[in-house]
Amino acid sequence: MGRGRVLIVDNDPQIRRMMRTTLVSQAFEVDEASSGDEALESIRSSKYELILLDINMPGTTGIETCKEIRSVSDVVVIMLTVRSTEGDKTRAFDAGADDYVTKPFSTPELLARIRAALRRKARALDTAPARVQLGAIEIDFKTREVTGGTAQERLTPKEYDLLSYLASRPNQVITHRELLREVWGPDSGEEKEYLRVFINRLRKKIELAPDNPEYLLTEPWVGYRLRLPQ
């Protein structure tokens, strides 16, 4: 039985060929796109479990493509790039990427990241509560929508992963390391900038006063907790 369909998006045919060979050997079905525009056409006509998306493409960039994908799909997206600065990673996650792999990468590393990203998505679907009420704000984890504030908001996949993990452990302090490893993977335990970016984004969506949060609270030097009303 196949493991599902993967879309490879990269303007380098040799990289696409290498990744196709690797994924087909692991029983994935594979489609290819050489540009962001081709990728967007593909996801409109086919359903994918995962997209491998190069950031540095001519024309529509990987970041722009990821944002467009996120407007229509919650598919797992792993971004690939030769750039590995903290800012590059943050921009990728901010665009909605589930993970970020720096080129050159080994076949075992790529497969491990794919397996981890698919497991995290499956676990999040299994453990997330159906709904959470935070005062006037309601979070529907099935539709990933936040209502009751100034406007209806939709959670990106990473926002959803982070918030659902906190919501599955209400009123508990979750350390930075645990959140990073559970939401971003085992290699992300020290990269706290990811958390700061996404906690701030979540507060803008689920708090009526994001600068003075009532529910998504910081525990200085330790981590964060989601305080649910009694």
Image: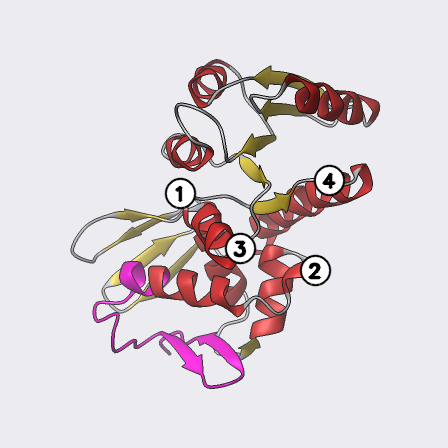
- Disc 4 crowd rating (10 Å Cα; few below 14, some 14-19, many 20+) is some
At 39% from the left and 36% from the top, the residue drawn is 67
Query: Which mark lies nearer to you, 2 or 1?
Result: 2
Residue 102: x and y, percent? 64, 45
Which disc number belongs to residue 110? 4
The correct choice, above or below, for 202 with respect to 18 in the image is below
Mark 3 vs mark 4: which is more N-terminal? 3
Which disc number belongs to residue 85? 3
Q: Secondary structure at mark 4?
A: helix
At 72% from the left and 26% from the top, the residue drawn is 19
User: In the rendered structure, which amino acid carries the disc numbered 2?
Assistant: Pro
Q: Is residue 229 magenta?
A: yes
Give the distance between the C-alpha atoms of the residues marked 4 and 2, in whole angstroms. 14 Å
Which disc number belongs to residue 11? none
Mark 2 vs mark 1: which is more N-terminal? 1
Residue 208: x and y, percent? 21, 67
Give the distance between the C-alpha atoms of the residues marked 2 and 1, in whole angstroms. 28 Å
Q: Which residues are magenta?
A: 202-230
- Specify whether 211 is left or right of 71: left
- Disc 1 crowd rating (10 Å Cα; few below 14, some 14-19, many 20+) is few
